[in-house]
Image: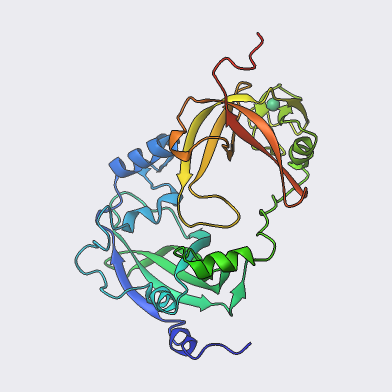
Amino acid sequence: MAEHEWMNEIRALVGKEYGRVYAWDKVNAPMIRQWCEVMGVDPARYTAEGAVVAPPAMLQVWCMEGLVPNNYPPGSTTENPYEALGLLEAQGLASVVAVNSELTFGRDVREGERLYYTTRLDSISPEKTTALGTGHFVTLVMTFFSQKPEGDEEVGQLLFRVFKFRPANPVKKPDAAADKAKAAAPAATKRPLPGISDDTRFFWEGARAGKLLIQRCKGCGELRHPPGPVCPSCHSFEWDTVESSGRGTVYSFVVMHYPEVAPFDHPNPIVLVELEEGTRLISQIVCIKPGDVKIGQAVQVEFNSFNDGELVLPQFRPVAATEGVTA
Ligand code: ZN
């Protein structure tokens, strides 16, 4: 398909390099300690030859703007490295979803180094249509450098790819024409199907049989979810399953308001349920107003069928704290 005329201007930007964005602070031990605390890792492991080194995954952190948008240190570029995204937005491709991000590390970054990055617009894909809508994959590559008197040194890269698209089901204001179109609308959008692997097949087959199954290590007996090939405790590859009672409590939740992705109802309450067996799983909560979901709420699994029976999902509904408890 021939591209829209307006894509020429945007495509002309591919390969463009955008100027430096500096770090507010030098690589420093307090920031490393706090980051490790948040991530739940031991900061003591991030030393080399007596010096403090930054966890590699912190690379992007050093040059972040902070709480105030676009608040970068003096000397940073005033160009907008995301200008291609803005131009696509102006053409109605207003929605965005991050697709993938790849960090590449050149070497350890040590306490006292000052970093900056530059950005290159790496590529813009041909027009693609996905379940979300039609648009373009846009790839940006940020290259991180350490400032050195003898010449700046590249220390790593971050590839960041987003899909800029026109939603397949744009949110419209209700009006008579829209209602009429809705009445004449073809089959409803189907629920996305889960990616099923040898490690997870039991879970979906269990759901189809009306059972909520939890993976159990045959080596040490520990339960785990989400399913995986190896026990994180004893590293055994041997496992079987146990059937959950399906009872649990809401450990945490979010209520999704936007984007409104078909076929889900919105607002869409999504819960992290802690089962009474101890494992947690993400699911939807039904039979409750989104505003009424509470942490600690007792819930019970139920199995609901979607896509004309193609998909069975465990979902949860609220119950009185004692309902169904026989012990
Ligand atoms: Zn084990």
- Position of residue 124 relative to residue 40, above or below, is below
Task: Please say whether residue 159 is visible from this viewpoint.
Answer: no
Within the image, what quadrant is residue 169 found in?
A: bottom right
Image x and y of residue 165, in percent: 51, 71
The single residue placed furthest to the left in the displayed view is 74
**The C terminus, quarter of image:** top right
Image x and y of residue 121, in percent: 45, 76
Image x and y of residue 234, in percent: 67, 27
Within the image, what quadrant is residue 23 found in?
A: bottom left
Which residue occupies 76% across, 33% down?
Answer: 210
- Position of residue 252 relative to residue 68, above or below, is above
Q: Nearer the viewer, residue 6 or 315?
A: 315
Q: Nearer the viewer, residue 205 or 113?
A: 205
Q: Quadrant of ligand 1?
A: top right
**The N terminus, quarter of image:** bottom right
Which residue occupies 45% across, 30% down?
Answer: 294
Task: Please say whether residue 49 is visible from this viewpoint.
Answer: yes
- Position of residue 265 relative to residue 100, above or below, is above
